Image (cartoon, helix red, strand yellow):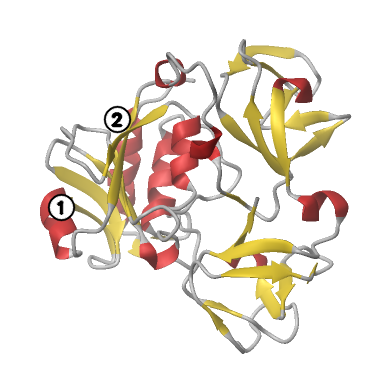
């Protein structure tokens, strides 16, 4: 994988130049003129060459994606020597979804570029000053080191750092367990010449005659897969989901723009009884937009 942090930062500058405004309810990546912090960073890193996660990440799910794709966690609420290209995530893991977290990219040792509510768009600020003004939240920092460097010396796969949430529309999540990596094939089952590194995780979007779809195809023998049983079996009974937006309300029928009944706080967990025929809503007492929750595996 070829990745350019300069291209990623250039994307953030372009969002600023385009005058995107802050919103957690639109595209989140700037494509409709609005973005939020995690959507902007995800889109920027994708513009730099990072692989797709299969959905627009939030501050909670970004950790796993970074660790799985060549980034190292270089700070865990601890001092570090920040440099251009470091990605920071504020908010303790488990409590950082929705408005509970924040993220951006360092453009030098002191300053960050980020999409934020305070400036209603993308701005450049001194990290430490902005962090202090926000109440000194728990933080993490990540630095790109390439997949091989990030996993160098790992004798055992640390699954604990790859656990988390996947989108309700995904088939599941695959961890590469073949020490030699998993050969990636195109959809005609021809080898691409690329391998997915041991210990990395990938969103599985479906199957092709038993092979796993992860942007290309891999042999299931090369991975451990955690299945989203609702997608696989069509049976959502007992499946747990977590609310990931701060505007989640239940409604009486599974249709867009219905009156809200009960407010569901960000981070709250609920059990699904069924899913609408179009897959757009899940029932957790009342119906809720599936984009406002993530399946918990």
Above or below, comparing residue 296 to residue 13 in the picture? below
Identify the residue under disc 2: 6
Residue 126 visible, this orientation: no
- Indicate which disc, 1 or 2, sits on the residue closer to the N terminus: 2
Q: Nearer the viewer, residue 253 or 27?
A: 253
Q: Nearer the viewer, residue 285 or 99?
A: 285
In 3D space, how far apart are the residues under numbered discs 1 and 2 (Cα atoms)? 18 Å
Q: Is residue 225 left or right of residue 98?
A: right
Residue 196 visible, this orientation: yes
Say few, some or many: other residues with alpha carbon within 10 Å of mark 1 (under 14 / 14 to 19 / 20 or more): some
The residue drawn where x is 19% and y is 32% is 83
Q: Is residue 185 left or right of residue 193?
A: right
Identify the residue under disc 1: 125
Quarter occupied by residue 88: top left
Instruction: Measuring from the top left, give residue 220's x and y in whole percent.
Output: 77, 25
Above or below, comparing residue 52 to residue 49 in the picture? below
- Element marked by disc 2: helix
The residue drawn where x is 52% and y is 38% is 160
The residue drawn where x is 66% and y is 65% is 290
């Amino acid at each position: 994988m070829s990745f350019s942090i300069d291209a990623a930062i250039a994307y953030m500058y372009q969002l600023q130049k385009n005058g995107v405004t802050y919103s957690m309810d639109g595209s989140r990546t700037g494509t409709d003129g609005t973005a939020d912090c995690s959507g902007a960073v995800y889109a920027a890193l994708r513009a730099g060459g990072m692989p797709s996660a299969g959905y627009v990440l939030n501050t909670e799910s970004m950790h796993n994606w970074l660790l799985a794709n060549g980034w190292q966690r270089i700070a865990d609420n601890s001092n570090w020597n920040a440099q251009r290209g470091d990605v920071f995530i504020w908010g303790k893991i488990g409590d950082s979804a929705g408005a509970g977290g924040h993220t951006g990219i360092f453009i030098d040792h002191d300053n960050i570029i980020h999409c934020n509510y305070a400036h209603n768009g993308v701005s450049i600020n001194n990290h430490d000053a902005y962090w202090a003004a926000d109440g000194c939240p728990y933080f993490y920092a990540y630095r790109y080191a390439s997949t091989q460097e990030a996993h160098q010396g790992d004798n055992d796969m640390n699954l604990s750092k790859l656990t988390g949430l996947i989108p309700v529309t995904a088939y599941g999540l695959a961890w590469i367990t073949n020490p030699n990596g998993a050969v990636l094939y195109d959809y005609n089952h021809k080898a691409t010449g690329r391998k997915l590194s041991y210990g990395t995780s990938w969103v599985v979007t479906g199957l092709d005659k038993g092979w796993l779809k992860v942007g290309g195809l891999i042999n299931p023998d090369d991975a451990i897969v955690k299945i989203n049983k609702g997608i696989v079996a069509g049976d959502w009974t007992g499946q747990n989901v977590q609310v990931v937006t701060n505007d989640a309300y239940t409604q009486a029928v599974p249709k867009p723009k219905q009156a809200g009944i009960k407010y569901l706080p960000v981070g709250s967990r609920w059990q699904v009884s069924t899913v609408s025929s179009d897959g757009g809503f899940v029932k957790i007492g009342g119906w809720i937009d599936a984009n406002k929750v993530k399946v918990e595996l």
